[in-house]
Image (cartoon, rainbow, N blue to C red):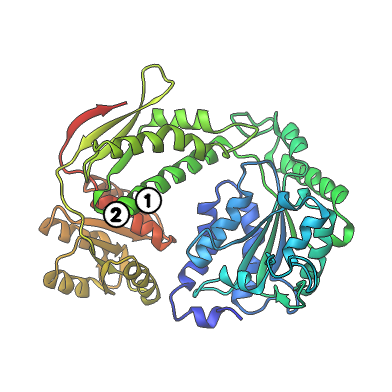
């Protein structure tokens, strides 16, 4: 059995789980209905109230390519287990022939190659995608419509009784698993339906709710034509993903740029630098990397080709100093990006940076402290302004993270005190609601970052790493 609600309360992880819907909506952009359909099943599992003798939940995710179906499963893995890779993935395109389905359960004893062929769906592999935080396994059958019919027959037993018998007679228990099937069934018809309604750079000619209903009907009809009733009836929720609108595509681009900055910080360590992308460059990447047909699927490859590879060439050529800033700008011809390096005064980033975290929520403090110590940060915590002042007197910190609402004052008030004593100190203000306009302007002027709750520890770590790598003086040189 995996860790459930009572166990998790001691680790601080419930801070993320209580805000599961918000966190997943931040990571999977533009699909709020999908998140609302999945989250209750995870909450039932955490409360130890999932039905016995069957998987925690079974979901069929439908919709056009590039709308976030696979991303949903990866995002859940990241929130629950701390890594998007904590998913047991079965690419159904590799099981189109009937004899290939046997690879999933292995050959029975006595068959040729029995010992050499290991089954894909074993208990060990299922347990390997859990974590110390949560014992819930995520199993993804990608593009289920491509699989041979015998695969869906095999899945009936898992969906109904949460068990699978392998070729060697061993039984795999799926009672602590979420099953996801993704499919593009009906996607072409859905794109025709939305071409004049909403979506990529299109005006709204009909109510979105009406179009959503039409899309769901198209998807459900396609499913009923493809799969047998006994398979469809065992699915807990058939979820239709809508084509992404321009605003959602822009948010996804921001996520990819943030991930690139995180990758630079993590891989280069003390040699890292910051990346600034101009609005014109962002429009270029959106134009090249998104479309009505493929949604955001091409965006990652576009960033890799037009941004990551040129950055790598600069780094390999020794043209980017530690702590520099690389400005990404659009060329005059509007057909390519140019990178301009703004060198900063070299300030070595500590191997083990020190941070003071101030919050009156002890569970959150312990959760953040554990994550940051694991990332090799030197961490001190305080639950009030008074305790934070005492720690600040006794130790030098590279960064301070302050909750806005504290028992004896506000985090902005304390940030101003610390700034007056150390202008170079990097500070982050955490808040559950938007700051008052005056304090927002003050934070912007003094370069205090504002981090909206809820968030994952990786978000805070990446933000702090970016702060510590920011340049302190400007000496420009261009690179194309």
3D distance between C-alphas at marks 2 and 1: 8 Å
Q: Is residue 93 above or below residue 110?
A: above
Q: Position of residue 129 (x, y in %)?
A: 57, 67
Q: Earlier in the sequence, mark 2 or mark 1?
A: 1
Left or right: where 230 falls relative to 287 = right
Q: Residue at x 60, y 39 (%)?
A: 244
Q: Position of residue 97 (x, y in %)?
A: 80, 51
Query: Which quarter shows the N terminus?
Result: bottom right
User: Which residue bears the numbered disc 1?
Assistant: 262
User: Which residue bears the numbered disc 2?
Assistant: 465
Q: Look at the numbered discs 2 and 1 and tell me whether their residues touch, using CB distance below 8 Å.
A: yes
Q: Is residue 381 among the parts visible in the rendering?
A: yes
Query: Which quarter shows the C terminus?
Result: top left
Q: Is residue 43 among the parts visible in the rendering?
A: no
Left or right: where 47 falls relative to 9 = right
Quick one: label 1, few (<14), some, or many (20+) residues within 10 Å?
many
Q: Is residue 125 above or below residue 447?
A: below
């Amino acid at each position: 059995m995996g860790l459930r609600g009572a166990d998790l309360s001691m680790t601080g992880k419930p801070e993320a789980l209580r805000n599961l819907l918000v966190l997943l909506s931040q990571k999977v952009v533009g699909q709020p209905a999908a998140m609302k359909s999945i989250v209750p099943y995870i909450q039932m599992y955490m409360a130890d109230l999932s039905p016995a003798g069957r998987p925690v939940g079974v979901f069929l995710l439908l919709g056009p390519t590039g709308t976030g179906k696979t991303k949903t499963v990866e995002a859940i893995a990241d929130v629950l287990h701390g890594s998007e890779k904590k998913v047991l993935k079965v690419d159904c395109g590799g099981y189109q022939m009937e004899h290939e389905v046997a690879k999933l359960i292995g050959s029975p004893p006595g068959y040729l190659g029995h010992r050499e062929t290991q089954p894909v769906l074993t208990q060990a592999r299922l347990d390997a995608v859990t974590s110390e935080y949560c014992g819930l396994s995520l199993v993804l059958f990608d593009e289920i419509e491509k699989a041979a019919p015998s695969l869906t027959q095999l899945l009936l037993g898992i969906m109904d009784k949460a068990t699978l018998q392998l070729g060697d007679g061993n039984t795999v228990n799926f009672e602590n698993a979420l099953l996801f099937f993704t499919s593009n069934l009906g996607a072409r018809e859905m794109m025709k339906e939305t071409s004049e309604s909403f979506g990529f750079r299109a005006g709204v000619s009909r109510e979105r709710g009406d179009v959503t209903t039409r899309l769901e009907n198209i998807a459900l009809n396609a499913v009923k034509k493809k799969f047998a009733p006994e398979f469809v009836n065992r699915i807990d929720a058939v979820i239709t993903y809508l084509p992404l609108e321009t605003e959602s595509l822009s948010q996804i681009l921001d996520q990819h740029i943030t991930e690139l900055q995180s990758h630079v910080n993590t891989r280069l360590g003390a040699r890292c630098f910051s990346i600034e992308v101009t609005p014109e460059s962002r429009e270029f990447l959106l134009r090249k990397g998104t479309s009505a047909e493929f949604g955001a699927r091409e965006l990652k490859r576009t960033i890799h080709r037009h941004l990551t590879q040129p950055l790598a060439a600069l780094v390999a050529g020794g043209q980017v100093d530690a702590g520099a800033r690389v400005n990404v700008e659009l060329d005059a011809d509007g057909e390519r990006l140019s990178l301009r390096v703004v060198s900063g005064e070299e300030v070595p980033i500590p191997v083990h940076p020190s941070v003071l975290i101030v919050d009156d929520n002890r569970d959150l403090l312990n959760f953040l402290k554990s994550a940051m110590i694991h990332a090799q940060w030197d961490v001190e915590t305080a639950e009030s302004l008074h305790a934070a002042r005492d720690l600040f007197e006794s130790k030098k910190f590279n960064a301070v993270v302050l909750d806005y609402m504290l028992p004896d004052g506000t985090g902005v008030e304390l940030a101003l005190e610390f700034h007056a004593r150390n202008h170079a100190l990097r500070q982050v203000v955490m808040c559950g609601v938007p700051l008052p306009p005056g304090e927002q302007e003050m934070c912007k002027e003094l370069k205090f970052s504002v981090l909206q709750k809820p968030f994952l520890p990786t978000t805070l770590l990446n933000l702090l790493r970016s702060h510590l790598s920011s340049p302190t003086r400007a000496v420009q040189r261009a690179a194309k």
